[in-house]
Image (tube, rainbow, N blue to C red):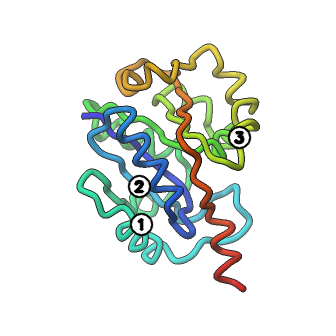
């Protein structure tokens, strides 16, 4: 089983998030994508909307058979990706997990608690995003993991690769961003 783990605030979830999830599902040959909305992103200053509301919105947006929405972070009492990855690998030793992120997340990945261990535990799939593609590819994490980068043409092999391993998928860019949508609804 090949499962993509797609974590984030998803505040609100939007078509750009779905674009990232669908791209990873298709290009990596995944069986499932598990959406893991965070109760509180430790790197964001504002508190996100209610978890139940965000989960319902993700469920409506990603209402596809191979997309699953989970409150695992809340149930584990954590907001750290490394805790989620450790838990899932202990609980499901035969599953090949891949961490999915947009390029905007890769630009700040070096600030995540345990990011080096995350990269050592699961392959990473980075999907291009309009706002941060260059800064992501020049980020401290991308530079440190440069030798572990798998060519985009070989992305389908990523879930079965031994970490550290990552790929950067270039797709037609999707313009939606949660911050812009929050500002629109606040006006």
Earlier residue among tags 1 and 2: 2
Q: Residues within 10 Å of mark 3 (few under 14, many from 20)?
A: many
Q: CA distance from mark 1 to mark 3?
A: 24 Å
- What residue is pinned by disc 2? 35
Residue most extreme to the bottom: 187
Residue 148's place in the image compared with 120, above or below, is: above
Label 3 near label 2: C-beta < 8 Å?
A: no
Residue 107's place in the image compared with 167, above or below, is: below
Residue 110's place in the image compared with 51, above or below, is: above
- What residue is pinned by disc 1? 58
> Is residue 96 or residue 149 the one in the foreground?
149
Query: Residue drawn 66% across and 57% down?
Result: 42
Callout 2: SS: strand
User: Where does residue 122 sit, x and y in percent of width and height?
Assistant: 46, 30
> Is residue 96 or residue 137 the one in the foreground?
137
Label 2 near label 1: C-beta < 8 Å?
A: yes
Q: CA distance from mark 2 to mark 3?
A: 20 Å
User: Where does residue 71 sit, x and y in percent of width and height?
Assistant: 39, 62
Query: Residue drawn 38% across and 32% down?
Result: 28
Q: Quadrant of residue 185?
A: bottom right
Callout 3: SS: loop
Query: Residue drawn 56% across and 50% down?
Result: 80
| Labels in figure, total | 3
Residue most extreme to the front: 172
- What residue is pinned by disc 3? 107
User: Where does residue 92 sit, x and y in percent of width and height?
Assistant: 28, 38
Residue most extreme to the top: 147
């Amino acid at each position: 089983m090949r499962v993509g783990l797609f974590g984030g605030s998803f505040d609100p979830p939007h078509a750009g998030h779905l674009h990232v999830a669908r791209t990873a599902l298709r290009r990596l040959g995944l069986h499932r994508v598990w959406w893991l909305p965070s109760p509180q992103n430790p790197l964001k200053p504002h508190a996100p909307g209610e978890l139940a509301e965000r989960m319902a919105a993700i469920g409506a947006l990603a209402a596809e058979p191979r997309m699953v929405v989970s409150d695992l972070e809340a149930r584990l009492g954590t907001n750290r990706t490394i805790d989620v990855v450790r838990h899932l690998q202990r609980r499901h030793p035969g599953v090949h997990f891949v961490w999915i992120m947009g390029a905007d997340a890769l630009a700040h990945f070096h600030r995540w608690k345990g990011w080096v261990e995350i990269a050592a535990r699961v392959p990473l799939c980075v999907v291009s995003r309009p706002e941060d593609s260059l800064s992501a590819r020049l980020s401290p994490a991308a530079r440190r993991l440069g030798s572990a980068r798998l060519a985009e043409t070989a992305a389908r092999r990523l879930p079965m690769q031994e970490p550290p391993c990552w790929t950067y998928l270039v797709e037609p860019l999707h313009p939606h961003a949660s911050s812009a949508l929050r500002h629109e609804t606040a006006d």
